[in-house]
Image (spheres, coloured by chain):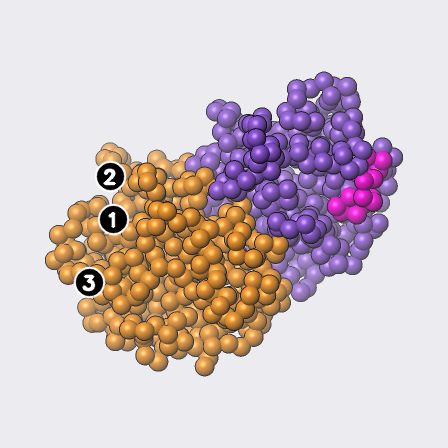
Chain colours: A purple, B orange
Amino acid sequence: MRDVSVAGAAMTPFGKFLDTPLRSLAAQAVGGALEDAGLGPADVELAFFANATAGLITGQEMIRGETALRETGLLGIPIFNVENACASASSAFHLAWMAVASGQCETALVVGAEKMAHADRKRPFAALGAGIDLERRGDLETFVYGEDGTPGTGSLFMDIYALLAERYMERSGATERDFAQVAVKNHHHGALNPHAQYRDEVTVEEVLASRTISGPLKLLMCSPIGDGAAALVLRAGDGAVKVRGTALATGRDDDGPLAVERAAEKAYAQAGVGPGDVDVAEVHDAAAPAELQIYEELGLCGEGEGPAFLASGATMLGGRIPVNPSGGLLSKGHPVGATGCAQLVELTDQLRGRAGARQVQGARIALAENAGGFLGPDQAVACVTILEATG
Amino acid sequence: MRDVSVAGAAMTPFGKFLDTPLRSLAAQAVGGALEDAGLGPADVELAFFANATAGLITGQEMIRGETALRETGLLGIPIFNVENACASASSAFHLAWMAVASGQCETALVVGAEKMAHADRKRPFAALGAGIDLERRGDLETFVYGEDGTPGTGSLFMDIYALLAERYMERSGATERDFAQVAVKNHHHGALNPHAQYRDEVTVEEVLASRTISGPLKLLMCSPIGDGAAALVLRAGDGAVKVRGTALATGRDDDGPLAVERAAEKAYAQAGVGPGDVDVAEVHDAAAPAELQIYEELGLCGEGEGPAFLASGATMLGGRIPVNPSGGLLSKGHPVGATGCAQLVELTDQLRGRAGARQVQGARIALAENAGGFLGPDQAVACVTILEATG
């Protein structure tokens, strides 16, 4: 496999854009990424289009990429529609990397685009409900609510995050205040990001006083519904930002390592680096408590040390390894099929010194962790990507 | 890129299996393909799962592969969900080939699985309706029905096939009787295939007397709604069946070559063969008239010669190049996300001399053509795959 570089990267602002079709969001991100790369549509040989919910949101169940990219000048080339729930875009990035690394093509494009905001506000939540194994919904409900099956909030997804947060509190001593502190940090970062859906600072008290969603989860600890797109152009050879590792794993029923842990182990091995080498990370804080667990799963700190690691300031801008300098899913937003690419756009900008007020000084190695769906206590799929500044 | 072989191939029977979940169909095909390859689930390093309609049929919009493969022992490895309408499975096959050819892995699995039959009989037709660009449905209706916009049969998809058939009749002189003859041929083949959804011979008179669907299209000229799954195991190195070419193209708005023509040109070039070298083909006869057009688009005969080529018997079993010996989509059935893999399972069996009563004697080079969706008069995506017997 040969070297692959990120030659261009761009994203739309994230937010709720009721009147903007998916195709417009996709075209804006693609146009930006091509311009950034100094290339035109005719230079792209393969495209991978990531989206998770269009079938249930707009009804465009099939040929999502062909329709969304119709006005970009890309039609004609092979387009692959890739889905892996909230990890759709990192999965698509992995395939685009493979296409270039293998010599199948010189230039590939990956786009993640999602439109979730809808006049019918129940629709995005219903769509997100398809991130579990529907045939085994009963098993999952028993796992989350116990044999008595007390119904939860209506969002089984958020109830799973809440249960995992409670278990994490038991084994690490984490408190709701720690979770709130994650939201405070990520909103602080997001306030510096012109693409973020929410650009307001929040306090621990505000987070704790926000509406309870499920168990220890408050509204401001949960990523919002939103729209957006992000795109990257991958090219063979050297460039300012090199892909050092990209690995996926899917969830299992056994007691072995989680999908995130297995994906991280593979990505570190491929990159030839360890957690101590990472200068900046974007991780999948779909709910605030998850970020503390991910610190541990990625080996950024030891088991049970998540709260202390956060409290040390290590993961704040200015700390040893800023996590979610973009604002993360909590503040930047989480149009699910776009998120994996948006994380990599942020890291590419960080490695090129283009992150403005949220720049991590001297960042050389960057890591993205993106996960999706639940098969039980384990995420259905996790993807870890490692980039390096070569300039 | 290194050599890639088909090490195992299997499919379920196609049919309407209202009480069989998608996971059972997928597991049956995967188990069969692994057994055929003499491998177990632990030998598979990557899996690609093709499906086109589950989001709208069962609601399982996300993590389709992770849920469908849950009982196969495959969970843990990377699983990519791939969609490209009726060409989903050949698109997934292409990516599995790329993964092995590139050295990314030694063994990859590709599964196409679809469950369309539903107690609510309107649901599969509604799902198929998502194979066009919904935002431009109006443009497409104007194209098909003219400015006055006389509504068609309710299935815009079949009305497009009908319009293309009418245009083809004008330029080639093809008649409804020619189209009926395609159905007669494919039902004759399908009657020899234990996996076919319909195993009854039909006569030209029966086809012409069947209910009118749209324009010149009669019921027996249209592929049926159905369920099924097909899987292939790809391995690095030499084997009895080698992948010689695999190419995709997407549809365009211009007057240039169609997606099928562009994909075929690339696949022939990659394989280093031409239409005259092909011994057996499976093509996308979603509607009977399409098969005649595909003969021409693949260069199996000259422009406008489709009807004469069919009438010559060349594409019947026993002819120079039998087309759709499996029965094709018309008789074997068309669970859309499974079709691309099912075509390749049939061709693998043909090249290994395992096709029983429908064996094409001495077949060495086999071609599959799989297409999906409509962006206008052109298919949204087309994929052509060329296999070779090396034994």
Q: Secondary structure at mark 2?
A: loop
- A300 in the magenta segment: yes
User: Which residue shows up at 29% across the image and 72% down it?
Assistant: B358
Q: Which residue is mark 1?
A: B162
Residue B74, x across and y down, in percent: 57, 57
The answer to which of marks 1 and 3 sits earlier in the sequence is: 1
Q: Which residue is mark 2?
A: B152
Q: Secondary structure at mark 1?
A: helix
Circles 1 and 3 on the same subunit: yes
Q: State the extent of the magenta-drawn residues as a range.
A: A296-309
For residue B201, the mark is 3
Q: Residues within 10 Å of mark 2 (few under 14, many from 20)?
A: some
Amino acid tagged 2: Gly
Above/below status of B235 relative to A255: below
User: Which residue shows up at 58% across the image and 44% down it?
Assistant: A375
The answer to which of marks 3 and 2 sits earlier in the sequence is: 2
- A227 in the magenta segment: no
Q: Residues within 10 Å of mark 3 (few under 14, many from 20)?
A: some
Res A202 → quadrant: top right
Amino acid tagged 1: Ala
Amino acid tagged 3: Glu
Subunit that carries the residue with mark 2 = B
Res B3 → quadrant: bottom right
Circles 3 and 2 on the same subunit: yes
Residue A184, x across and y down, in percent: 77, 27
Quarter holding the N terminus of chain B is: bottom right
Residue B390, x across and y down, in percent: 46, 79
Q: Residue furthest front?
A: A147
Res B107 → quadrant: bottom right
Between residue A205 and residue B286, name the one nearer to us: A205
Above/below status of B279 relative to B22: below
Above/below status of B243 relative to B119: below
